[in-house]
Amino acid sequence: MTEGHLREVAEQRQLRLAGVKIYSRRRRPAAAPGILPHRPHLFGWSWLGALAIATLTWGSVVAFGETAEWWFERDTAVAGWFAERGTAWLDEFAETVRALGSAWLVRTLLGAASLVMIVTKRWRHLITFIAVVLVAEWAASRISVRPDQVETLQASIPMATVTASAIAVSYSLLPAGRWRNRWLMLTGMVLAAVGASRLYVAEDLFTDVLVGGALGVALTVTTFRLFVPDVVFPVSYAMGKKAHLSLEGGRAAAVRSALHHQLIDPASMMNAGVRSALRDQLGCELLACQVIDLKAFGLEGSAGSTPLRIKVAGEPDTYLFGKLYATNHLRSDRWYKLFRAITYGALEDERPFSTVRRLVEYEDYMQRVFHSAGLPSAEPFGVVSLSPEREYLVVTEFFEGSAEIDKVDMTDDIVDQGLGIIRLMWDSGLAHRDIKPANLLVADGQVKIIDVAFGTVRPTPWREAVDLANMMLVLALNRDPEDVYNRALEQFSAIDIAEGFAATQGVTMPSQLRSLVRQRKAETGVDLIEAFRSLAPECPPISIQRWSLRRVWVAAGAAFSVLTLAVLLFNNLRGADLL
């Protein structure tokens, strides 16, 4: 392929943005790490290794009688050493310290921490916290450290429970960093004192304390690192939505680097020989364009991603729009779809995405489908990989100087454009499924539709009808409903409108739109939904409940899980034996 042909292909891929050009994307070498690499946590793995060693030791004790006798002799020697140093004041001090591992203290800690997580709505941390404590207590009660013929015994249940509770509190309530580290240091000293006190009063042997403590730490650290890792679900008491990732640390630098490597490549002021060498050896052309500003943007209207406004140096400078997706958004999407499947059944019987990459691929695909259909949506510019299979950035056109549709003068032209978007979606076999003011912008008098992540191809008539009703509600926020209805009749039939509002209930509207409709009713006394229903022909209500076999199984499984957790927690709090 000649240099001239390469240049022609590159120019065909050029972005239609003033001053910013895209030529060949930079190819990351196969052996190089990702832009935002995922590093394993040695702390968690080390404790998991300690638990594995304890398990192997237990296995040797069970399998070989001589090993069991040798181990029991060592434990007896340690117990004798503590007994020889007994004094009156040490007896009193040991009893006081031992109380720190009592059942009432553990349950008090469990209840207080659970209350904080309920108030702050950190449900994943709450479920993980309760599960860890319950499983640690159950596992310790079932692990036999020695065979029956050698005196005793089991792992120390109090040590396992109090250790799991104390470590779980740090991961559930304290942000990662200085305060958590200080709590863990203090916890380690307290747990060591509790273990020593139990040895001193001969309530446990050394192996019991060691295995119980290792079990509590390993189980808690591993579980929290797997199910609620800090990089995905950080503990924070700042106001805001959990979907909005922090740009602190290395994430902002990673976004800048990834944009340079994967999207923006002006290839200016470089001679042909150097460009050819770089392209042949690195798969790219030298970067000269810079991301000069990166900040969160429009957070109040976004609940499923972290939206960013990216300022790029060019001739002149320009803006791009990005949506940052990570593992927590994937998990939130799964929970959202599970809830919708239980609530509505077949109408929302969607399958969750398997990976973050599938999630962003779908959004990028829908961006391209909407744009190619002629809808006034943002032009898609591609997907940026920050950490493969973990974090990605979807980059699109940014509508500079735009405002949400409910913040502008609702003229006849704006109303017609909004209704025309729905008409074009119907004709193109598309549905947006998230029509609300935050997703309808007005720039230079033109209505733009954004955030097509929930979009679908060949939607059901029910979905199309709900899109129409939600658009009419948005347009009527600052306009008389009758005016909106009359203008809608120019593009839709009266039956179409009637079906839309026959299928519309509070839960079929996005939360922002639902809130604004209630606010309009409180201020003016006008119920927009009833106003449109009174204008349209009479139509029987359309049920939003559709039963399916999957809905039955999912609902039954969810109910069983909640009931089981509630019973275990109740038994634990009242002091009953687990299982």
Image: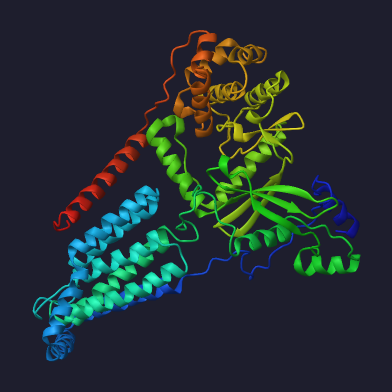
Give the left or right position of residue 517, taking residue 144 as reference. right
Residue 22 seen: yes
Residue 134 x/y as whole percent: 25, 59
What color scheme is it? Answer: rainbow
Q: Residue at (28%, 46%) from the top-left corner?
A: 561
Give the left or right position of residue 256, taking residue 109 as reference. right
Which residue is farthest top? 537
Position of the C terminus, as image quadrant, is bottom left
Q: Residue at (25%, 78%) from the top-left corner?
A: 193
Residue 63 seen: no
Residue 416 vs 212, above or below: the answer is above
Q: Residue at (37%, 71%) from the top-left corner?
A: 184
- Of residue 130 and residue 60, the one placed in the foreground of this image is 130
Residue 527 vs 99, above or below: the answer is above
Residue 513 vs 384, above or below: the answer is above
Position of the N terminus, as image quadrant, is bottom right
Task: Say which quarter of the image contains residue 107.
Answer: bottom left
- Of residue 149 and residue 134, the one placed in the foreground of this image is 134
- Of residue 442 and residue 434, the one placed in the foreground of this image is 442
Q: Residue at (40%, 51%) from the top-left corner?
A: 122
Residue 119 vs 491, above or below: the answer is below
